[in-house]
Structures are given as structure tokens and as C-alpha cells.
Image (tube, coloured by chain):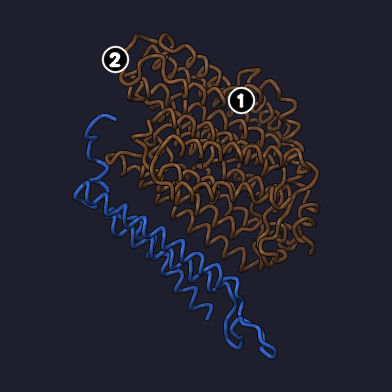
Amino acid sequence: MSGNISLLVGILFGIGVYLILHRNLLRILFGVILLSNAVNIFLLSMSQSPQGKAVPIIEPGSGPAVDPMPQAMILTAIVIGFALTAYLIVLTFFLYHHYQTLDLEEIYSRNEEASS
Amino acid sequence: MNLGIVLPILLPLFTALTLLLWTRPSAARRSFAALSLLTLLLVLLADYFLDVREKPWVMHAGGWPAPYGIALVLDLLSLLFLFFSAITVFASVLFAFAHEPVSQEHPLRYPLLFLLLFGVNMTFLTGDFFNLFVAFEVMLLASFALMTLECSSDSMRYALPYVLMNVVGSLFFLTMSGVVYGYFGTLNFAHLSKIAADPSHQFFVQIFALLAICVFGLKAAIFPFYFWLPRSYPVLPSPIAAIYGGILSKVGIYVLLRLFGTVFPLGMAFPLEVLLFLSGFTMLLGVLGAIAQDSIKKILSYHVISQMGFMILAIGYGNVAALTAALVYTLHNIVIKSSLFLIGGAGQAVYGTDELKKMGHLWGMTPLLGIFFLLQAFSLAGIPPLSGFWAKYLVIMEGLEAKQYLLVGVALLTGWMTLYSMLKIWNGAFWGHEQKAKQYPLPYPSGMAASISILVLFSLLLGFGAEGFIQVASRATEQLVNRREYQEAVLSRNM
């Protein structure tokens, strides 16, 4: 199982990094989303395999529980990632509205409209 | 004791929430914000004169004992960083009051600033890696929002490098936490320092150290992670740039000090070599970039990078006295950097722009600003008896004792080139003929002068009272490397 998850995390990281290096802002946004998902799954894989382990609600007579710490970390990370993604979406929208293009090369090569 | 730890976090948070509800900008609202900062300063002073100098104060959140719960730790190192950043924010906020009239103020500016301060203070107080991640994210999101609020629509594209690189940095921080948790089984600083002392884990501790250098180096803008800084800081208004350039970049240095002082065993060869190697490039490339710019804020942004190189250099030497040197340099730099940004902002208020070609003769118009600039610029370049001289002296002495002659040479060369770039600002903005002045009738508003003078007087105090300052810093470093005391304070069962 850990081999499968490692492969999944590796593929997601790879796609995410590839997308972040693009010049289209929308692809960069999707790259950030994929990378944050990849990191969350990576954190999940830091708990051991859930085979034969109980849910982490301790009742008398329950066996060894799954490690709850990574799950807590993932919850926090998802929430924070959601806020970051929301912010990036609004920034992307603003830049599109202002420059009529999402191409970063073009956005950065437009000259300043007025002096500061 | 618990109140003393928690107030630096709760005060900015409640102020931010109050300011969010109190939406209409007014003088009363501004006074409330300033009063809250003054209270924070008083609380921190009170903490110092109670016994933080003796041993670290610990509060276990929710009553859960560490390492199962989160511990907030206040020791002298955290207190020094908290105090210096509080003074910087206070002066910058006073400058911001003078810089923009109440009618033009955006109602979200001060709430976001206080949320930023909340994140920064929590970073300095936390004793757990994941709480550190949350504090970093609070700080980052507030800084993203503040940056896009403040810059004009044409400069919004320059916020993008800052946002994207810091987002990638946070994701990398999460990965590092995952790796550390997966191998060590804990994320608490004290528990990690206990496990890391065991020599059988040396290899993974070094991997952890290298990952930490990448993550916190990105935040601290060292080579090769600094490229987001010079593109994004110049578009900020000066009081905000002072806070970003003065405090936000130093947060990464604080974490590196904490890691290399408390968590990692002293004298790990390879990560320290990496730090030394990166520091040389950081110092040189930063100051070379500064020389090439022609606007005040761009020059100062590049300076932030090269000053970071000095701090990394001192951490990289690897002995306890070098950590004192790094601490002294970082603290003095917080004050100097912010005051330089504010001085640039005052010059910009006179001319409406901070491009050196369009400025001139500020010395004739406002000699006070010129005196402030000379004092701070000479301190940055390291001229005695100002605070920068003592900081640089410590760093270079430690370098000579650690036999890093090449890097000491690079440091001296960088200091010389820093002086040259400061003279560039002096010639362009303060000397020369008067150009068309734009906004304020001369002299510029006294509020700006007052806020800059707070920081200048404080840095003069650091310079002339250098012996006391260095003694306090050495006491902080002693507490930092006293691992057993830290572990006992955090991991004991009683709170």
C-alpha cells in the first residue's frame, strides 16, 4: 500500500510542479491546487497502514487505533489550502479583468501605464 | 505567567477583530490601534522584568501536556524578537497615520496589519512545528491581502511572485512536517531536540536540517530563494514595506536560530557548510542588485537580501558565540531596515515618487531627514559607534575565529558596497538640485518625523548601549542552547 501511495504522491507532485511552471495563470492555479492535494495525501501516508487498526475513538476493548495526528494535520492543511486557493482565484480574476489576458509573459511585458 | 505568554498573541487578535467591526475610519479608531500597540509594548517590558531571563515560561494549551498538546514557550530569545517587532510595527503605524489622511484610509488596512502581527507573534511564541505552520499561514495570508490592498492596480502583477513563491514555500513546509513526523513521530520542538540528540538519528536530523534551510530560507529570502522579494516589496507603500522588510523576513531567521540552537545538536557539519555557502552568494548578489537599482525602495529591497546573508553567515559558523552574533545582527537589522524604509517614504511624500532621478536636494529642504538617513545608513554599513558596527564586528570576529577567511572577505566587501549604494541614495535624493516637489509643503508632517525618530533613537540606544545589548543577547543565546532546561520546562507533566 505504501508503494501505491508513494506513486500517487509522486505523480501528483510531478503534475503540480509541471503546471506551476507554465505561463498561463490558470494552469499555475491548478498546479497549486494539485500540489496542495499531493501534500495532503503525503501527510496521510505518514500514518501507518490502516489494515487491522480501529478508528481513533477509544472505547474499552478496541484494538490499536490508527494514528490520528496526520489526520489532524491534513484537516488544518485542507482548510488553509482552501483559503489560499480562494485568494489566488480572486487575484487571477482581477489580473484577467485588468489585462484581458492570462498569459504571464504578456502581463509582465506591458509597460507601466502611468508613473507611480 | 500564563497571561504574559498569551497576551502578545491575544492583544493583536482582539484588536484586529474590534477594528473589523469598527469599520468607519476615524481618529478614534486610529488611537485605539495605537493604544493597543502601546499596551503590547508595556506587556513585553513587564515580561522582561519578571523572570523570563531566568528560565523559559511555558503554557500548555488546553491543559494537554506536551508532546500531545501544543506548548507556547516564552524565553528571552522570543521576547527580544517580540519586543523589536512590536516597536517596529508601532513606529510604522504612526508613520502610516501621518502618511495617509483618515478620509483616504481603507478600512481593512489596520485589521489586516494586526492579523499580521498576530501571526508573527504566534511564530515567536510557539513550541510546536504544526502551530508554527499555522502561524506562518496566518502571517502569509494577512500579508497577501495587505499587499493586494495597498498596491495600485498596475502593480498588482508584482504581487504574484510574492504570493506564488510563498504558497509553494508553505506546501514545502507541510511536506517537511510530514517527513519529520513520519520519521521522528513528533512535531514538538522539545521532544524533537531530545530525539535528535541521539547519534543514531544523525542522518535524518541532517536531512531535516537541509529541508528546514530550504523552507525557512525561502521565507528569509536567501539565495537561491530570494527572487520574489525585489519584485514585490517596491510596490508597497512605505510603512507597509517597512513592516515587511523589517519583520517578515526575519521570522525565517528566528526559526533557523531556534532550530540550530535548540533542536539540532551543535556542530552538524554538512548543513552548516550549506548555510555558509549560501550566505556568501546571498550577501554578494543582494548588494550587487542594490547597486544596480535607481529607486529608493528597490535599493532597500535588495539590501534586505544581502543583510540576510550576514545572519545566515553567523548561524553557519556553528558555535554558541556565533549564535549571539547572529541574534545581535538580526535585532539591530529589524530596527535599521524599517527606519530606512520609513525615511524613503518620507522622501517619497515630498516628491511623490521614489525614483532617484526625479528627487534631489532633500538635505536642503529637510535637514532632519538627512540626519536620520545618515545615521541609519552608516549604521547599516557598519560605522562605529552605531549599532551596525557592533553587529558586524561580532559577525566578523566570529568568522575569523572560525577560520572562514574567504567569507569574512566577502562580508567586508559587501559592507563596502552597501556603503556605496547608500551613497547612491544620498547623492540622488538628498544632494543635488531641487526638482519639482509634489505633495506636502515643506517641512513634511511632524508625525512622520516623530515615528522615524522613535526608531532612530532606539537604534542609537542600541549602538551606544552596545555592551548591555550584547549581554542581553548572550543571555538569550545561553537560554537558547540550554536544551535540558528547555526540555524540562516543556515536557514536564505539571504546567
Taking B84 as reference, is B449 left or right? left
Rendered hue of chain B is brown
Q: Looking at the picture, tell me which residue is in the foreground, B25 or B324.
A: B25
Q: Which mark is residue B95?
A: none
What residue did someone put label 1 on? B459
Q: Secondary structure at mark 1?
A: helix
User: Looking at the picture, does residue B363 appear above or below residue B480?
Assistant: above
Kindly tell me whether residue B45 is visible in this rendering. Answer: yes
* Residue under the point 64% across and 53% down: B126
Q: Amino acid at mark 1?
A: Ser
As drawn, the chain in blue is A
What residue did someone put label 2 on? B436
Q: Secondary structure at mark 2?
A: loop
* Residue under the point 50% across and 34% down: B304
Kindly tell me whether residue B269 is visible in this rendering. Answer: no
User: Looking at the picture, does residue B122 appear above or below residue B303?
Assistant: below
Spot occupied by residue B372 in the image (x, y as percentages of width and height): 52, 18
Taking B185 as reference, is A101 left or right? left
Quadrant assignment, res B454: top right
